[in-house]
Image (spheres, helix red, strand yellow):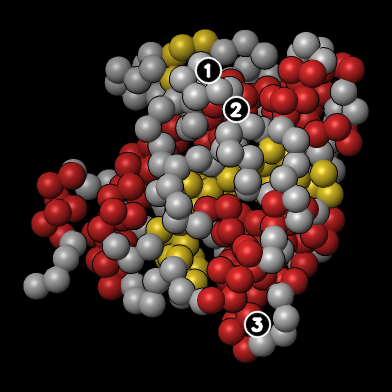
Amino acid sequence: MTSTLNRHEDGEGSVQVKQDPKVHIQEGALVIAVYGKGGIGKSTTSSNLSAAFSKLGKKVLQIGCDPKHDSTFTLTHKMVPTVIDILEEVDFHSEELRPEDFMFKGYNGVQCVESGGPPAGTGCGGYVTGQTVKLLKEHHLLEDTDVVIFDVLGDVVCGGFAAPLQHANYCLIVTANDFDSIFAMNRIVAAINAKAKNYKVRLGGVVANRSAELDQIDKFNARTGLRTMAHFKNVDAIRRSRLKKCTIFEMEDAEDVREVQNEYLSLAKNMLENVEPLEVEPLKDREIFDLLGFD
């Protein structure tokens, strides 16, 4: 794969990592990129959503795009080797690899890949994401996949970590009902709008996480044109599932567990059947300060 800097396609003055146009995910698969403020619960959301899609009979692939490579451990019950580490072992001769070297089967058949990343300050996460998709294509591992979920590091501030948006149909933004999370969400909206000028990616909606109420999210949605697709309250079963290194679908049967499971299944069904692209206008920073908060 060759990566080039593209200064204008993704917005005036932008400097973005551009993927090889021949390396793309085939038509027919639903490709979702999950973004949100750091620590907001993107990996938990991604893994449980992957599990929900699998429960609906879909063939699912989850790609973790964080150098911490902790996106899929609740699906696989372990920390799996990363693509970048495996490639380094064979001096980046990808033809020497077998699929089982970098793809691992998780809960209910979900296929799991961790891109990993270069050491801090030494490389670009977008390049690693591109290498991962290229490797999956070379081994024909995307040809029989119904749903692909990219779980992406933090909020979008650079072209590298915006790279999954070049492959996605929809972006889901995970947020809490607080100022910092919504402020980060606003930046993500702006990044997706920039990518949507030249790629198929569109906003799918908001996943409200760890939030008893939705008043601040509702204010932001009403002002910008976003919508909430799912609401997960601060349920202790979700926290316990992470400690048990499993998805919510593997937890002991209880009312609160069933409620969360049903919400994930509903989100998966909506993404398959009812989601429509949104036209969203991000706010200026000062406008968010003026909009949110208590009277």
Q: CA separation, marks 1 and 2?
A: 8 Å
Q: Residue 24 placed where, x, y %? A: 68, 28
The answer, for residue 174, to whether it is visible in the render is: yes
Q: Are marks 1 and 2 in contact (CB under 8 Å)?
A: yes
Please state which amino acid type lies under the numbered disc 1. Gly
Q: Of the residues tagged 2 and 3, which is closer to the observer?
A: 2
Q: CA separation, marks 1 and 3?
A: 42 Å
Q: Which residue is mark 2?
A: 117
Q: Is residue 181 above or below residue 244?
A: above
User: Counting other residues with Cα less than 10 Å from the Cα at mark 1, is it few (<14), some (14-19), or many (20 or more)?
Assistant: few
Q: Are marks 2 and 3 in contact (CB under 8 Å)?
A: no
Please state which amino acid type lies under the numbered disc 3. Arg
Q: Residue 84 placed where, x, y %? A: 69, 25
Q: Along the line of sight, which residue is nearer the eye, 193 or 75?
A: 75
Q: CA separation, marks 2 and 3?
A: 36 Å
Residue drawn 68% across and 49% down?
A: 72
User: Counting other residues with Cα less than 10 Å from the Cα at mark 3, is it few (<14), some (14-19), or many (20 or more)?
Assistant: some
Secondary structure of residue under mark 1: loop
Residue drawn 62% across and 10% down?
A: 2
Q: Along the line of sight, which residue is nearer the eye, 123 or 289?
A: 123
Q: In the image, is 70 to the left or to the right of 93?
A: left
For the C terminus, the image quarter is bottom left
Q: Is residue 252 above or below residue 40?
A: below
For the N terminus, the image quarter is top right
Q: Along the line of sight, which residue is nearer the eye, 278 or 6?
A: 6
- What number is the disc on residue 100? none
Q: Which residue is mark 1?
A: 123
Please state which amino acid type lies under the numbered disc 2. Gly
Q: Which residue is mark 3?
A: 258
